[in-house]
Amino acid sequence: MSAITKVLEEAIQEVRNLPEPDQESIGRQLLSHVERLRRLRVEIDNGLHSLNTGGGSELDIEEFIQEKNAGDGRG
């Protein structure tokens, strides 16, 4: 059993000791978080595949930062 699995098992045991409405809420939050991680993994895998097949382009980091800051009133 890995350290992460032990921690998760400990967390689940602690959640079992909570009232049922709290268990439901935590369960929904955990499932939502896992789904976001799955979607992020798919996006990362797609991006890596694109880069590996020549789909990427060089990025001017200074220009990128200026464009991002321009939208929030800082630039």
Image (cartoon, grey):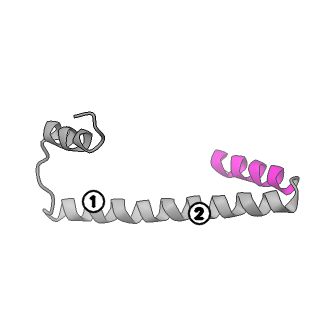
Task: Please name the residue shown 30% across and 41% down the image.
Answer: 72
Residue 63 shown in magenta: no
Report the span colored magenta.
2-16
Q: Amino acid at mark 2?
A: Ser
In the image, 51 versus 33, the foreground residue is 33
> Compared to 41, does 11 lie above or below?
above
Task: Please name the residue shown 65% across and 45% down the image.
Answer: 3
Query: How crowded is the residue under tag 1: few (<14 C-alpha within 10 Å), some, or many (20+)?
Result: some
- Callout 2 secondary element: helix
Q: Quadrant of residue 26?
A: bottom right
Q: Quadrant of the C terminus?
A: top left
6 to the left or right of 57: right
Query: How crowded is the residue under tag 2: few (<14 C-alpha within 10 Å), some, or many (20+)?
Result: few
Q: Looking at the picture, how far across and down is residue 60, in whole percent? A: 12, 42
Q: Looking at the picture, how far across and down is residue 74, in whole percent? A: 27, 33
66 to the left or right of 42: left
Q: Looking at the picture, how far across and down is residue 59, in whole percent? A: 14, 46
The numbered dot on residue 60 is none
49 to the left or right of 58: right
Q: Would you name the residue on which mark 2 appears? A: 32
Q: Residue furthest top?
A: 74
